[in-house]
Amino acid sequence: MISQLGQALVLLAVLTCAVGAPIAFLAGAYRSQKGLAWSRKLALAFGLWMFLATLAMEYALITHDFSVSYVASVGSLATPLHITIVSLWSSLEGSILFWGCVLGLFTAAVAVLQRRGHEDYLAYTLGTLFCIGLFFSFLIASAANPFAPTQPPIPTDGPGPNPLLQNHLLMIIHPPMLYLGYVGMSVPFAMAVAALLRGQLGPTWLLPLRNWLLVPTSFLTLGIMLGGWWSYEVLGWGGYWAWDPVENASFLPWLTAIAALHSAIVQQRRGTLKAWTTILVLITFLLTILGTFLTRSGVVNSVHSFTQSPIGPLFLIFLGICLVACVILLTLRIDTLVSEPSEDSIVAREGAFLLNNNLLLVAVMFTVLIGTLFPIIAEAVRGIKVSVGEPYFNRMSVPIFLGLLLLMGIGPALPWGRSDPATRRRVLLWPLPAAAVAVVLAFMLGVRNGYVLFTCALAGYALWVTLNQVLRPVWLRSRKGEALPRALGTVASRTPRRLGAYLVHFGVILTFVAIAISSTYQTDSEASLAPGQNMSVGGYDLTFNELEVERAPHRTSQRAIIDVKHSGRAKGTLAPALNQYPTQREPMGTPAVKSTLTHDLYLTVMNISTNGRVGIRAIVTPAVYWIWIGVLVMVVGTAICLVSPAPVGAPAVGAQRETEAATP
């Protein structure tokens, strides 16, 4: 019953998109309000069908309906309820269904929310979203059909989802955040296509584009952070980023989305970088399709790639069609991409935006893209396996990231437009003492690595500029007699998006420094311990007490109970474990992590011998906690930008004065 219902709902989604796309494009071409109204209704219908289909699959999973093929492949009577629910995205067919559901909800949201100021573009936007929806709903109905009936005999139980997906609660929220980021990029892509079809890339298009770009970017930022946290908490290697091909697949569209957001700021402010903004938005979507191909086709080996399937060629065909369509559109509308005449100097804020957020971010993107795809291309062309590992990515991308950090300080310090050399020299030299203070402070705290000291110097420079941009208008108001809290509230209320943007910058600076420190100053030790024996690492004394066996319906865990002391003071116990799943031959570790604001103590069980000894790896890593804090600050700043609509065109007079006052 569920199998037939689910397939019927997906077929309704296919039909809705097939009908909705031509109606929407015709409505856009003839500016038909009736056609637009029908397009909105069909967008709501598409979202409804995909949502109901997803609910049907969840019902099948929860009720253990093994007559549905997907449930038979990932379901299990022994799997806990919360894992059963999230097993929707544990394998190929369910994850594509979830993708279709999120796409349907985004399409419906555009139809409902984008009512004013975007009527000239909305029909084309919905038509493009219908085309994307048609591909994914067709995929769900055919090659990736989760509702296909199970071939007799119908099993009475199943293997359960991949054990890696059962090993930490982060898997409940990490994939949905990534999907909301990935799928959400379809909306700005559709809006860019609509603007090219309409031949208008003005302010009425730019503001909603920025808003719809902010939404998936914030989700993608959070998803990448949660993925790094999951890797850190589950895989047992003590790190959070390994330049894994699927990690890179999520990172690539994030880079171009950030660049597109900054280009949009310059376009709104100065009327320039139209081509950059449009092309970056298009590339971002294409990279999400490429990333989905890498994740779900099985062409790369990755701890994040849980499936191998025959859908790879279909994704490549869709990617090729989208690429060709984008090139044709850009060629036909090349005249609309010409920026307004400008006498701006390259040594100005917009010049720094171009260098920082376009050229350098795109350079990082291409560096990561080449390193990710080269092994695949080499194997396909020459039949040899080539590995591109962490040394390549670090050697090639770290200098570019340091350049980005430097320009995060230089860009906001420079005024908009042309300015005299004396002004530029003054604003660029002003933060240098802060860079020196940051180096001295880092040296006093024990930092001796030149790379980390240089990072701290750049961070101090950028931090001074960021704080100056935020606090100087407050200080100027307080000098005129306004109370400090009221001055802060006035500035925040008049320029909230600016405040959110600099909060994002602060989070980036924090994350950069934390990554530099944590990746450089890591101490580790390994030992085989019998009960009562101890080991030392990074000022910690660790005593192995006993092994505890914990049995659950879906796994058996052996937990090593370890007493922790630091500088002679008891710090409680940690219990790293080895988990044995019925479907897995080798046991899977669950590290135990004790986090503080200064460092993490990370314990993982490498092996357990028959005589009761345990192999323990202990790692002390500084500043890891600040990575998660920095990314969360970035997400909060993005949310502030999103909930605080910016005026179309130039900023209001008051906001303009507040902005200009921030330059010393």
Image (tube, rainbow, N blue to C red):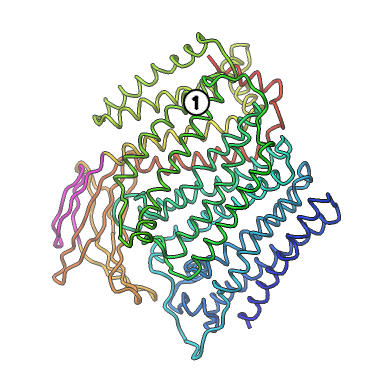
Instruction: Identify the residue position indicated by label 1 in the image.
Output: 466
Residue 155 horizontal/vertical position (percent) = 47, 87
Q: For this rendering, which residue is in front, 447 or 297?
A: 297
Queried whether the magenta region covers residue 541, the answer comes back as yes
Residue 332 horizontal/vertical position (percent) = 68, 44
| The residue stretch that appears in magenta | 521-545
Q: Is residue 614 above or below residue 233?
A: below
Where residue 161 sits, quadrant-wise, is bottom left
Q: Is residue 336 above or below residue 486?
A: below
Q: For this rendering, which residue is in front, 293 or 178?
A: 293
Q: Please give the count of numbered marks on the rendered protein.
A: 1
Q: Going 86% across and 55% down the picture, which residue do you hit? A: 34
Where residue 270 sits, quadrant-wise, is top right
Q: Going 30% across and 28% down the picture, which residue do you hit? A: 453
Outermost residue toward the bottom? 153
Side of 143 relative to 74 (left or right): right
